[in-house]
Each structure stands twice: as C-alpha cells, then as structure tokens.
Image (cartoon, rainbow, N blue to C red):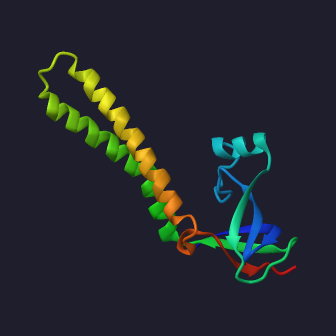
C-alpha cells in the first residue's frame, strides 16, 4: 500500500475529499541542496492536490488522515497510461509498414499516419478503460487511519 498524509476537506456519500501536498522530490536524499528536484520544490512552494478517497473510517472535515492506494492499482494504472498507447502506436506502424511492403512511394508517410492513428486509438481505449474502472474500489484511494493530534 502506498500511503500519503492528507487533510479532509469535505465528506459526501461515503467519500472524503482530501487535500495532499504534492512533492516532486522525496526529501530523503542527503543531496537536497544540489538536487534539481528539491530546488524545483523550493521554487514552486507547496502545491496541493485534491483527491476523492473512500471514507471507511467516517473521517470528518478538518481531520488529518493517512490515505493509501494499492501498489497493484498504481502498477496497472501506469502500465495502462504508458504502455497501451505506445504499443498501439507501434503495432499500427508495423501493420502499415507490412501492408505497404516497404516499396510503396511515400510509404513512410503511411507509416507515420498509422502510428499517429494507433496512438489516438490507444488514447480512446484508455478513456473507455478509465470510465469502466472509475467506481471500482480496488483502484481508489482509501482513508486508512487518523493521525493522532
């Protein structure tokens, strides 16, 4: 489970809207002064992300909590976002190259157009996939515990 501290902003219908602080660097490195990521954090200041999490602990607005997302959900989500459009692009390009036989005049243009079409098809698949799993609790953040105050 990947965990993050958050503050509950509002509660509605079994969900808690929480606000987390977004960080681009881990903060665990001893080279923070020479690290570009920590300098980027210092330049931009605290950025916040608002997330809807399953409220299994009946947390209320103002509570500091720990939310978590299953590692498997993050892994599958990353695979879907990065690999599917890329694979679709490559498969469409290879298919166009195979159909053109490499001998057609302007064959590179067909391959490039097919690659773009494959990437767009991958994006459409990703949009449909996201709509299917939007309410699946396996892929949603969950309020795990209250932080002691």
User: Which residue lies at the image location 39% right of the left edge and 43% below the top edge?
Assistant: 121
Q: Position of residue 8 (x, y in %)?
A: 81, 69
Left or right? Give the position of 57 relative to 70. Answer: right
Q: How many marks?
A: 0
Left or right? Give the position of 24 relative to 86. Answer: right
Q: Position of residue 138 (x, y in %)?
A: 53, 74
The quarter of the image holding the C terminus is bottom right
User: Which residue lies at the image location 15% right of the left edge and 33% below the top edge?
Assistant: 99
Task: Quadrant for residue 104, please give it.
Answer: top left
Left or right? Give the position of 103 relative to 113. Answer: left
- Look at the image and tell me whether residue 35 can be seen: no
Is the residue 126 above or below the residue 75 in the image? above
User: Which residue lies at the image location 51% right of the left edge and 70% below the top edge?
Assistant: 71
Task: Quadrant for residue 20, please give it.
Answer: bottom right
- Look at the image and tell me whether residue 65 can be seen: yes
Q: Residue furthest top?
A: 105
The quarter of the image holding the N terminus is bottom right
Is the residue 129 above or below the residue 2 in the image? above
């Amino acid at each position: 489970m990947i965990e993050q501290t958050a503050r509950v902003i509002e509660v509605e219908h079994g969900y808690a809207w929480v606000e987390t602080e977004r960080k681009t660097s881990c903060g665990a490195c001893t080279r923070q002064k020479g690290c570009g990521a920590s300098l980027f954090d210092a330049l931009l200041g605290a950025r916040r992300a608002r997330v809807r999490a399953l409220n299994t602990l009946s947390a209320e607005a103002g509570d500091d909590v720990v939310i978590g997302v299953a590692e498997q959900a993050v892994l599958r989500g990353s695979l879907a976002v990065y690999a599917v459009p890329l694979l679709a692009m490559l498969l469409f390009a290879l298919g166009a190259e195979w159909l053109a036989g490499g001998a057609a005049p302007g064959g590179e243009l067909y391959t490039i157009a097919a690659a773009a079409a494959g990437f767009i098809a991958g994006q459409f698949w990703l949009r449909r996939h996201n709509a299917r799993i939007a309410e699946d609790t396996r892929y949603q953040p969950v309020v795990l515990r209250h932080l002691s105050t």
